[in-house]
Amino acid sequence: MYYDSYNTINRLDHYLPVDVYIAGCMPRPEALLAGFEKLKELIKAGKGEGQNEYAEKFEWYKANQKKIIKNWDMPDYNW
């Protein structure tokens, strides 16, 4: 996949919160494993804050998601 391909989102953090970025195009298996290890460390230390950010900025994320996924019947979350 290329950064300007029709099926590539250039800024994932505009659509979902991101705690760990993994380098590579396509990332090697070792890079994926290192990313998962880093994520586990963040969660264990209580620093994996992606879910909190998503809840705080839910409407912003939802609006951005609707821009790229047309005619998607998104569920209404009432939390």
Image (cartoon, grey):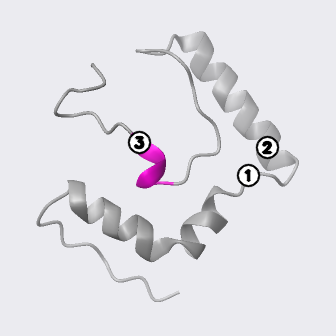
Residue 24, position in %: x, y? 49, 15
Q: Is residue 7 left or right of residue 3?
A: left
x 36%, y 69%: residue: 62
Badge 3 element: loop
Amino acid residing under circle 1: Gly
* CB atoms of marks 2 and 1 within 8 Å: yes
Residue 52 occupies quadrant = bottom right
- Determine which residue is flagged by label 1: 48
x 31%, y 24%: residue: 3
* CB atoms of marks 3 and 1 within 8 Å: no
Tell me the tag on residue 11.
3
Q: What segment carries the magenta color? A: 11-16
Residue 1 occupies quadrant = top left
Mark 2 or 3, nearer chain start: 3
Q: Nearer the viewer, mark 3 or mark 1?
A: 3
x 79%, y 43%: residue: 42
Label 3 packing within 10 angstroms: few (<14), some (14-19), many (20+):
few
- Determine which residue is flagged by label 2: 42
Residue 16, position in %: x, y? 47, 54
Q: Nearer the viewer, mark 2 or mark 3?
A: 3
Separation (CA) of disc 2 from disc 1: 5 Å
Residue 25 occupies quadrant = top left
For residue 14, above or below residue 23: below
Q: Is residue 63 left or right of residue 41?
A: left
Label 2 packing within 10 angstroms: few (<14), some (14-19), many (20+):
some
